[in-house]
Image: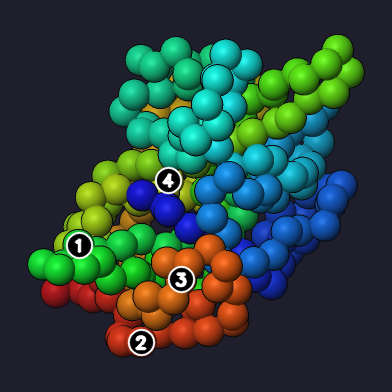
Amino acid sequence: MAGRLHVQQLPLARLLPRLKMTEPLLESPNVAPRQPVSAIRAVDGTLCLQSLFWGLTPPWLTVLDNAPHCARAETLTQRNMFQEAYRSRRCLVPVSGFYIWKRLPRAKQPYLVTQVDRGPLLLAGLWCRYHTTLTAYTDSTALITVPANACLSPLTDRLSAVIAPQDADAWLNPDTDHATLDRLLTPAPLELLGAFPVSKQINFPTYQSPACAHPTGPMIRWTTP
């Protein structure tokens, strides 16, 4: 699953021409859970970029450390925490990549997952609203994960669900039927994503160097047999 995000220099206006930049894009080479992230939501039919807290915090949650930053696609209709949001409060988190960790005998090696051409990705998410007073509230989000495809499954068993730009409206529309949503929450096409190892310095959320995205080895990508 996505434990960290890489968000840098995203051409959102070109990717989604209808997007209204209501807030500036929050950029960071190493975004950790329980930090704000920029997300795209449909507001009165308009796609808007807004800041959300990364970690789903429904009103009944009492311990912030228990706020999930990811949700498994297979359980969205089964868990109370996710059911309502999946029905009507979906969002997209634009990123330039996301980090995963491959388990090794004595350590974990971080990898950065990106489009093979290093273009932007739209990650599927849910959001909810927690009112602190009658007028004040906090909006939060969790990313949705799906099984890793055959190309990247040697690194991890789960990856963030990626929504194609042409499917953004369908994903964000609260009236989209469940059959369509289920179709969108499938493993990424084999040729879309690649992953390359990066420095273990990214294990530290305070590490915010551009070197976060510097490969320390070749990219793993799908090649036609």
Spatial CA span between label 1 and label 3: 16 Å
Ranked by sequence position, the earlier of labels 3 and 2 is 3
Q: Neighbour class for label 1 at 10 Å: few (<14), some, many (≥20)?
A: few
Camera-nearest label, 3 or 2: 3
Q: Which mark is residue 161?
A: 4
Q: Is residue 104 visible?
A: yes
Check the image and report above or below for 5 versus 195.
above
Q: Nearer the viewer, residue 159 or 166?
A: 159
Report whether 176 appears left or right of 136. left
Q: Which mark is residue 119?
A: none
Ranked by sequence position, the earlier of labels 1 and 3 is 1
Contact (Cβ within 8 Å) of mark 1 with mark 4:
no
Which secondary structure, mark 1? Answer: strand
Spatial CA span between label 1 and label 2: 17 Å
> What's under tag 2, amino acid-wise?
Thr
Contact (Cβ within 8 Å) of mark 1 with mark 3:
no
Which secondary structure, mark 3? Answer: helix
Q: Position of residue 151 (x, y in %)?
A: 23, 63
Camera-nearest label, 1 or 4: 1
Residue that badge 2 annotates: 216
Camera-nearest label, 4 or 2: 2
Spatial CA span between label 4 and label 3: 22 Å
Spatial CA span between label 4 and label 2: 25 Å
Spatial CA span between label 3 and label 2: 13 Å
Contact (Cβ within 8 Å) of mark 4 with mark 3:
no
> What's under tag 1, amino acid-wise?
Arg
Residue that badge 3 annotates: 202
Q: Nearer the viewer, residue 180 or 162?
A: 162
| Quadrant where the C terminus is found in the figure | bottom left
- In the picture, residue 130 is in which quadrant? top right
